[in-house]
Amino acid sequence: MRNGRMIIRRNLAKDRFTVPKTQAGTNRVIHLIKPAIDALRSQMALTRLSKEHIIDVHLREFGRTEKQKCTFVFQPEVSAKVKNYGDHFTVDSIRQMWDAAVKRAGIRHRKSYQSRHTYACWSLTAGANPAFIANQMGHADAQMVFQVYGKWMSENNNAQVTLLNTQLSEFAPTMPHNEAMKS
């Protein structure tokens, strides 16, 4: 994490590390908002000096792997309730922690993956550029954002009109309406 940005180089899927599945590029740069930066910095204070691990990363070409070094920001030994933990969380352990957190918060159950949808909708509602949102989410262009999330945002139309009235009235030049302009 540098300058509020994080580079995504690998995913954990089905208990194996893979390169990101994205049309926008293999290594994706995520621009973090302040609450995410603060949370990651707090966590990194606990794990920053932890040992480096060598992991096998499965590449896009079938059967090819490469060894990569990494230090995990989130580590089981920091929060483990049992003694038999590995070097990193598994997909199942992340799901279990998510489910427990949702239950503790007293909110309706939803899968952690749905937080992507929340991010997209909240970002659109806040007025973020759809192309920026698409890039953040790993899409090649904004088309997916328009198709999937745009239809959910129609209740925001009045806010859009207010936004346009505010923004355009501040910089749009007024047109002269006197008789001299008619000739």
Image (cartoon, helix red, strand yellow):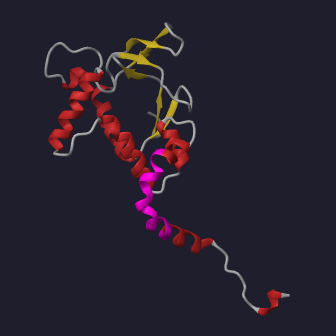
Q: Which residues are magenta?
A: 148-162
**Number of marks in the image?**
0
Along the line of sight, which residue is nearer the eye, 103 or 55? Answer: 103
Residue drawn at 20 percent across, 46 percent down: 107
In magenta segment, residue 32? no
Q: Quadrant of residue 51?
A: top left
Depicted 7 relative to depicted 150: above or below: above
Left or right side of 26 for 12: left
Residue drawn at 18 percent across, 22 percent down: 80
Along the line of sight, which residue is nearer the eye, 1 or 57? Answer: 57
Residue drawn at 24 percent across, 23 percent down: 93
Along the line of sight, which residue is nearer the eye, 117 or 55? Answer: 117
Q: Quadrant of residue 33?
A: top left
Depicted 91 relative to depicted 125: above or below: above
In magenta segment, residue 152? yes
Asked whether the viewer can see residue 23, the reply is yes
Quadrant of image for the N terminus: top left
Place of residue 50 in the rendered image (x, y in percent of width and height, measured from the top left): 31, 20
Q: Quadrant of residue 158?
A: bottom left
Place of residue 71 in the rendered image (x, y in percent of width and height, measured from the top left): 37, 20
Place of residue 7 in the rendered image (x, y in percent of width and height, measured from the top left): 48, 30
Quadrant of image for the C terminus: bottom right
Depicted 37 relative to depicted 88: above or below: below
Residue drawn at 58 percent across, 70 percent down: 168
Left or right side of 80 for 151: right
